[in-house]
Amino acid sequence: MFPRQRRSVIAGSALLLATALGLTGCSAGGSGGGGGGGEFDPEAPVTLNFTWWGNDDRADRYNRLIESFNEEYPNITINGTFTDFPSYWEKRQTEAAGGGLPDVWQFSDTYLRQYGESGLLADLGELEDQIDLSTFSEGLLATGQLEGQQLSLPTGYSAWAVFQNDDLLTQAGVEPYEGGTDYEEYSEWMASVTEASGGAVYGGTDYTQRIQNFELVLRQQGGNLFTEDGQLAFDEDDLREFWERGDADRNGVVAPQNRLEEVVPLSGFDSKFTASEMSWSNFLAAYSSTTAASHITMVPPPTTDPDAKDLYRQGGLQMAISADTEHPEAAALFLDYVVNSPEAGEIFGTSLGFPASTSKLEGATLEGVDAQVAEYLESVEDRLGDAPPVPVVGYGALEQTFWDLGKSIGLGAVSVDDAVTQFFDEASATLG
Amino acid sequence: MTASPAIRPDAVAAPDSARGPVARHRPTGPARKRRRGDTLAGYVFLSPWLIGFFALTAGPMLASLYLAFTDYNIFQEPEWIGLGNFERMMEDGRFWQSVQITLVYVLVGTPVKLAAALAVAMLLNFRSRGTGFFRSAFYAPSLIGASVSIAIVWRAMFSTNGPVDGALNIFGIDIGGWVGIPALVLPMMILLAVWQFGAPMVIFLAGLKQIPAELYEAASVDGAGPFRKFRSVTLPMLSPVIFFNLLLEMINAFQVFASAYIIGSGTGGPAGATNFYTVYLYTRAFTNNQLGYASAMAWVLLAAVGVIAFILFRTSRGWVHYTGDSR
Amino acid sequence: MTATATPLIVSPEDERRPSPGARGRRRRATTAVWAIVMVLIAAIVLYPLIWMVLASFKPNEEFGSNQGFFPENPTIDNYLSVLDGVGGVPLSTFFLNSLLLAVGSVIGTVISSSMAAYAFARLEFRGRPLYFTLMIGTLLLPFHVLIIPQYVLFRNLGMIDTFLPILIGKFLATEAFFVFLMVQFIRNLPRELDEAARIDGAGHPRIFLSITLPLIKPALISSSIFAFIWSWNDFLAPLLYLNSPDKYPLPLALRIFNDQTGTSDYGATVAVSVLALLPVLLFFIVFQRFLVEGVATQGLKG
């Protein structure tokens, strides 16, 4: 098995001298039984390690969920641990190399290929006694599938949307953007906001910075970002054309990038610098908190083809079980509880994305921003298409590179042609 | 370093030491000869370090050296590719960009920071009373841990109409916010490093405290002015500490990571302006999972800084004076 | 000579030789200029810090729109949300963990580093130049490439989710910074003292304890300060080696107030930085006093 061999090579060199000094008596390798032989006894006391990224609020909710789970399964002790997102993956990668991945963990589809192709994730399809897959739509199941195996399950989903700060629009005296028009109309609307406010507020943030908007444009033309076999499904010309379509907007319509750099890590929309911004629908709660706007309007993104099924249910936040776990069945029981139980719906609402399973959705009370997100998702039903192919290895890095290059174009630090070259250089280095 | 015989550090230090409880035994001729054969004591005193080095440090270092010659993506077995990583580095534009940014940072930032630290340490040392507040005030910026707060504060300082912009406007300089101008981000990073001059300042202070007052008195008797005293007492007596700070601050500057990572949101932005060597190395290791390439970069840095450190050690024989070593 | 009993001042215009008239006036003028310069530097250096403290009273929604010095709608909510603790673990637990690690680091670092430094600076033995070169070499490798091998090592030693991987290195002088710092200070001590003691029949342990250590007190104090503060602010080692939230030190626990994937609470993030700063600032204020105490006299009398 791959992981174990690799581990011993690194462990060997690291332990070379330690062993020579007789400091280590214990065996190298570290991983336990893997697969857990014998019959599963649902009553046997078991301890599971469970870890997630997220904020303080999420930690409280998980603790409540674990409590509720223990009412049903008092014999399964859950050791819950948490960190912030970047550290989370640094630690997981260290464990992937050195052993010690948690039994159950919050997962992201961005990493599905890396962890899945390396055999680090358990096939949830084999744990059907514990996990109910029938509550998920095909499209959402696909977000956790790789080569016929169900390696992770989404806790919730989002769809791309245009957010608008109603307070800023009222001040400027401009009606909200209606949504779903062609891109030219959206640009004209942004220009009208910028003009009406006299430059105090800009109509929007340069949408060509985000790879998700590029993806939408590709999907409107029947394409995708990636192929099924993990390669890029677009070429230099596609990208050049996309970035060039932002040229006119960058000329005084969207917020100038040099001012946006000053408020990082907040976005233009967060800092009430722009009246609109596109992002995932589950950002509504965050935007409400950072802008404190009295109301935020959500409308569908612009499109080149009103009939195209360009939007999709993005199941970014997932749950997975390590292939190495000694208690796959108990882990599966807990995972099922997180993604499927009405209790999870009640405790989390839409804070892990809009509930992906029907059973979890039943438990959720949708009020306030949650209800608004539900309403939005319903309104774009006709535009929701198939899930795109599983992201390529290193998609997270590529997404970031795309964004950085988009910002660099906005700063005038790089030309569109150079940015295209740099993106493809980076992509070929990442994809190997 | 030319010092008048009267204030040669070792010449004065000897009588100084004679005032202690061991004064009766002023060493003479043979006893002054350095004793050889401290092997047992040497290994006993060094044992914690020896165990630490061989058990904890050497293994991981060797492992990373091995990985430098492999293609290793964390998820698969390392694959030996010889000099492949190093060849790729030569053609990697972002690698060379990071080298350039880091060199400017080291060459400009280190001297400025050390000069500021030494100047402030001397000012603090000027008086004995009423300096506690200032010592703490000057050290306070160095106490802040690496967190997003630093990014929030520093970006605010250099934003359009922020304090720096405002101060420059007074002098008729209007460049607006620094953060949005990629060329000004490196100066901004250097100023952040200089702002956190507390560590070398504390070390300079400790070094200044170690200089016996008698040396200055002797110099005064010789009629030396403040500048002469600085040149012929402070500088030579402080030289081991200056050397330490120079070497360590240089090494730290080459490896600058936390502040650059935070200010650049971990991406080397804006427009690659915070793509420092170790930020790029980290990106390769943990964002792109190219640990082999990252290890190769690490060993290239080790070799480069090692050469510079070697040269510094060599030249130090000419300008660093150790009281305990001089004969 | 008893002059050395007063704090060692290296001021050219020393106050020890009082003289009336012009000299006194000039000294007062110098002091005034000195004070003005110090206040100016302090103002510049402290401005960003004070900005940060005031920002911790800004409500979250002001962070994007108000980069000014004062909050428009001051609030203490940021502190209240932090004081609640994180994920069911009270804030005091994180403080205690941080304190335990920091104190352990100080003790380990000072003992092991001073021993190693004594060996490097004062003892003659085979292999010393090689070991010294190796020690400097450990400073030169960016630590990121050591993360995984080191994790593998500690995992195989069964030390994951304990404080051991974080502390053990401190007791084994693995931070060359401290060893080298003390080497520089010991080498600058007059050797006559050691030799005199040796004639008296003192062995290396005695010389080390009763002559060397007291004389490098400024270096020991600054090392303690650095060891404490660096441990207090250390994030990576606890991240890698600790799993249970009730073992987390402050920086690790508080990261989650700034989760970019959800609702980032910048107000709480800055409040956390201010809270985390206070104990180390207090520590520094207490210990910096020792930095200015005279050394030579104390050492020789001790």
Image (tube, grey):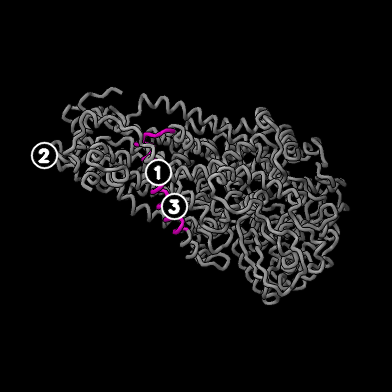
Tags 1 and 3 both on a single chain: no
Q: Residues within 10 Å of mark 2 (few under 14, many from 20)?
A: few
Q: Residue at x 42, y 51 (%)?
A: C108
Is the same chain shared between marks 2 and 1? Answer: no
Rendered-image quadrant of the C terminus of chain A = top right
Residue B38 horizontal/vertical position (percent): 36, 36
Instruction: State the image coordinates of residue C211 (x, y, percent, origin top left).
Output: 27, 43
How busy is the neighbourhood of tag 3: few (under 14 within 10 Å), some, or many (20 plus)? many
Q: In whole angstroms, how far apart are the C-alphas of marks 2 and 1?
A: 57 Å
> For this rendering, which residue is in front, A173 or B312?
B312
Q: Tell me if C47 is positioned left or right of A402 in this view.
A: left
Residue B298 is inside the magenta segment: no
Report if the CB atoms under discs 1 and 3 are less than 8 Å apart. Answer: no
Toward the bottom, the furthest residue is A71
Numbered disc 3: secondary structure = helix
Q: Which mark is residue B44?
A: 1
Depth order, front residue of A319/B178 = A319
Q: Chain ID for label 2? A: C
- Which residue in the structure is indicated by mark 3? C105
Q: Residues within 10 Å of mark 1 (few under 14, many from 20)?
A: some
**Which residue is disc 2 drawn over?**
C20
Residue type at tag 2? Pro
Who is closer to the viewer here, C151 or C145? C151
Asked if the stretch drawn in magenta spans residue C123, the answer is yes
Give the farthest residue toward the left.
C20
Label 2 vs label 3, nearer the camera: 3
Are labels 2 and 3 assigned to the same chain? Answer: yes
- Magenta residue span: C98-126
Helix, strand or loop at label 1? It is helix
Prevailing SS of the magenta stretch:
helix
Q: Position of residue B187 (x, y in %)?
A: 51, 35
